[in-house]
Image: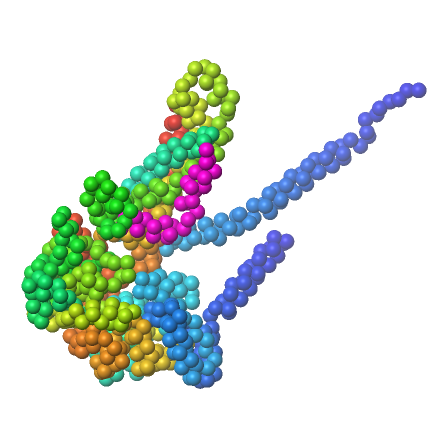
């Protein structure tokens, strides 16, 4: 008895069916993908795309909450570049970012490395460093207002132990912005420390042990193994820090209101002042567009630095 | 086809949501409807009642009184402060639900009237003569824009100068002859200033009450030389009087008073003894709950006079929103607010003077010597006068740029010239 295996006479329809099934599956997957994406897209559309378009359009008008408004083209932008308050605010914001970002990143990394060791009271220290992050900025600012109080504040009290004369921290044009920077650095540590800590715990033990066997010292291990390994996290911290420092507002609003004079006036404060105190919404929108561009430039520079670092 | 149906459904759903939201927030107009029949929500924004239990109780009395005329209208208050007044107004306009009654201060009316946000009160019979007859005439320029009246005064926020008799005697000065001109004030203040061995000021000779900016003090000192800040919306400070005044302030700060000096209670420093002399608001509590009778007895009040005797007077001014759908009810509410008993209550809550005729005989004026003094001095009232339409912007500009001049960061003459150029 012989058995012959014959090709199915109607092989083609089966192929067609398989292909059809595959297309159906693909369509189904696409539909599912869109369905899953829909909430996020809807959210982004309503809360990001529409407001951005609205800001761009408003920035070309002189709208000021009144009944009438007119197109002014790029008039608001031209005015901004002649506006000394805007220039001062931009400069203070950039300066704040340039000082606060690297210092806070460096301190956070150092603290994270410390917290990554097997030391006593680790949980306590981790909690202590994270507390400023979860505390409302208004409360933080109020505490720091007391610390900086020229008469009864902790800062002057502490420095007087070493014979330093009392300082009028927030009322002195020379020390007002640096005083705010100190608070900004302190407040931002918690989040960065947690992120760095997670990254440090992800560094390959094998690589660290290998380098140790090869005779690398602590610094060499850090520079050649740890630092490259946490590169992507560095970039994430950098980006979030840039966005965060450029959006600093509540701290300044509570502690100095932008003063003395305009010594601590920052971009968001200026935008708020123009929009909600001076009621120049069109002008404030143009300022917001400029801020977005500046943040994009800073992120671009950060990206280039990251690439250069990675290539090294 | 199916996509078309889907889109149509989505559009329909959206329009339902939008329209239902709209119906929930925006009332139908009640203008022309008899008060007893009018229904809706009257949104009231006012910094005149503090959001404390006492403030809310006082406001409820106003609402109860208003309900006698408009029994079906709901009143929704927003107890603002002068600090967040603008943002409350702007966000309400942007959100499409503007307030029906808005109480603002001196310097607000012209900018909002120019943007057509406030209603002309002429149609409710408010004229300068009515204000002169029933209210505080000194506040007429503050409620006038383009020869029309856009607000009705509720209370006058008058400021005087106080000195500590004991400090004067200690410094060899006669408290019965207070220094009044800018030159006299400086000489006396320098004598009254106390310092520690390192030269730090421990008691200020004069409190300029300018912790957050010099706009009001500059306006006050300038006016005491007979020079109003603005005349007919035009700047009147880019001149010798303006420069002399600014230079005088500059010579006082960090000399007789450290820049930015204030206390935690936000009290005038002369009342707490932290300054020997200084600007004070329109009332003082001489009871044991306040500064005490002994402290009160140590105070002497006077007015600036560098050629013209003046008293700086701000105030709470009630307006109707031009986009209100309840303008008649809003006017009814303002009429309730301006009843003498209500004004007395507001004045007491805020330690200010009721803006009705003969405020000198008001319960508030009789309650303490400072209120009596400022009430008697309303005839000397000055303020920023007839401000330009961009005054809201100029307020901040003044505070920032005058501070920069006082702290030596910018040339005072250039600052005044710049501010004059920015006023429009």
**Residue at far top of view:** A214
Q: Pick the quarter of the image with the C terminus of chain B.
A: bottom left
**Can residue A154 be seen by looking at this rendering?**
yes
Where residue A199 sits in the image (x, y, percent)? 47, 32
User: In the figure, is residue B342 to the left or right of B367?
Assistant: right
- Relative depth, front residue between A261 and B163: B163
Where residue B236 sits in the image (x, y, percent)? 14, 65
- Relative depth, front residue between A309 and A286: A309
- Relative depth, front residue between B242 and B309: B309
A288 lies above or below B97: above
B194 lies above or below A37: below
Q: Pick the quarter of the image with the N terminus of chain B.
A: bottom right
User: In the figure, is residue B103 to the left or right of B221?
Assistant: right
**Residue at the spot 61% in from the left edge and 53% down from the top edge:** B3
User: Total of numbered circles in the picture?
Assistant: 0
B328 lies above or below B391: below
Q: Which residues are magenta?
A: A120-149
Where residue B287 sits in the image (x, y, percent)? 27, 72
Residue B4 within the segment the image draws in magenta: no
**Residue at the spot 39% in from the left edge and 65% down from the top edge:** B93
Where residue B50 sits in the image (x, y, percent)? 35, 69
Magenta-highlighted stretch: main secondary structure?
helix
**Residue at the spot 33% in from the left edge and 57% down from the top edge:** A275
A174 lies above or below B146: above
């Amino acid at each position: 008895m012989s058995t012959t295996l014959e090709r199915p006479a109607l092989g083609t329809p089966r192929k067609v069916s398989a292909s059809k099934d595959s297309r159906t599956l693909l369509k189904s997957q696409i539909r599912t993908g869109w369905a899953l994406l829909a909430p996020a897209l809807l959210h982004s559309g309503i809360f990001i795309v529409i407001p951005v378009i609205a800001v761009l359009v408003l920035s070309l008008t002189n709208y000021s909450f009144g009944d009438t408004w007119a197109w002014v083209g790029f008039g608001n932008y031209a005015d901004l570049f002649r506006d000394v308050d805007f220039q001062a605010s931009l400069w203070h914001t950039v300066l704040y970012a340039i000082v606060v970002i690297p210092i806070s990143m460096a301190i956070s990394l150092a603290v994270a490395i410390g917290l990554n060791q097997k030391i006593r009271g680790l949980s306590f220290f981790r909690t202590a460093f994270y507390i400023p992050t979860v505390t409302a900025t208004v409360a933080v600012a109020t505490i720091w207002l007391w610390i900086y109080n020229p008469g009864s504040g902790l800062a002057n009290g502490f420095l007087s132990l070493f014979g330093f004369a009392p300082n009028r921290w927030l009322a002195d044009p020379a020390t007002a912005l640096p005083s705010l920077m100190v608070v900004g650095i302190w407040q931002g540590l918690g989040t960065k420390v947690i992120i760095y800590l997670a990254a440090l715990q992800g560094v390959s033990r094998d690589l660290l042990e290998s380098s140790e066997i090869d005779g690398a010292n602590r610094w060499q291990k850090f520079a050649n193994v740890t630092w490259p390994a946490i590169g992507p996290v560095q970039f994430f911290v950098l980006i979030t820090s840039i966005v965060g420092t450029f959006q600093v507002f509540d701290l300044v609003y509570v502690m100095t209101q932008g003063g003395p004079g305009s010594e601590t006036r920052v971009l968001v404060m200026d935008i708020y002042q123009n929009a909600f105190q001076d009621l120049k919404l069109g002008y404030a929108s143009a300022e917001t567009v400029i801020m977005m561009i500046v943040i994009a430039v800073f992120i671009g520079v950060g990206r280039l630095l990251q690439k250069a670092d990675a290539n090294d | 086809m199916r996509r078309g149906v889907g889109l149509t459904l989505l559009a329909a759903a959206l329009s339902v949501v939008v329209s239902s939201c709209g119906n929930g927030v925006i009332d139908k107009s009640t203008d022309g409807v008899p008060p007893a029949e009018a229904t809706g929500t009257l949104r009231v924004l006012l910094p005149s009642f503090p959001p404390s239990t006492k403030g809310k109780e006082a406001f409820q009395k106003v609402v109860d009184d208003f309900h006698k005329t408009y029994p079906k209208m709901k009143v929704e208050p927003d107890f603002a402060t002068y600090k967040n007044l603008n943002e409350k107004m702007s966000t309400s306009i942007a959100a499409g639900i503007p307030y029906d009654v808005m109480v603002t201060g001196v310097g607000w009316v012209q900018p909002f009237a120019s943007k057509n946000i406030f209603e002309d009160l002429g149609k409710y019979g408010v004229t300068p003569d009515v204000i002169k007859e029933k209210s505080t005439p000194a506040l007429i320029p503050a409620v006038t824009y383009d020869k029309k009246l856009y607000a009705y005064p509720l209370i006058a926020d008058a400021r005087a100068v106080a000195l500590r008799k004991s400090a004067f005697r200690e410094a060899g000065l006669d408290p019965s002859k207070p220094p009044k001109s800018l030159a006299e004030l400086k000489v006396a203040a320098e004598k009254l200033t106390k310092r520690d061995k390192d030269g730090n000021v421990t008691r200020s000779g004069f409190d300029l009450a300018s912790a957050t900016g010099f706009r009001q003090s500059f306006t006050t000192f300038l006016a005491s030389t007979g020079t109003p800040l603005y005349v007919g919306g035009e700047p009147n400070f880019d001149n010798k009087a303006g420069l002399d005044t600014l230079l005088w302030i500059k010579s006082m700060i960090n000399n007789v008073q450290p820049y930015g000096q204030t206390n935690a209670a936000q009290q005038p420093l002369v009342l707490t003894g932290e300054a020997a002399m200084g600007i004070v608001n329109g009332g003082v509590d001489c009871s044991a709950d306040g500064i005490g009778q002994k402290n009160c007895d140590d105070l002497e009040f006077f007015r600036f006079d560098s050629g013209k005797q003046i008293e700086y007077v701000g105030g709470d001014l009630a307006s109707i929103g031009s986009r209100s759908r309840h303008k008649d009810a809003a006017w009814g509410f303002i009429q309730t607010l301006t009843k003498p008993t209500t004004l007395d209550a507001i004045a007491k809550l805020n330690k200010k003077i009721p803006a009705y005729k003969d405020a000198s005989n008001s319960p508030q004026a009789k309650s303490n010597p400072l209120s009596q003094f400022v009430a008697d001095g309303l005839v000397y009232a000055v303020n920023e006068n007839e401000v330009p339409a961009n005054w809201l912007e100029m307020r901040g500009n003044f505070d920032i740029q005058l501070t920069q001049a006082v702290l030596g960061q910018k040339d005072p003459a250039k600052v005044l010239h710049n501010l004059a150029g920015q006023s429009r």
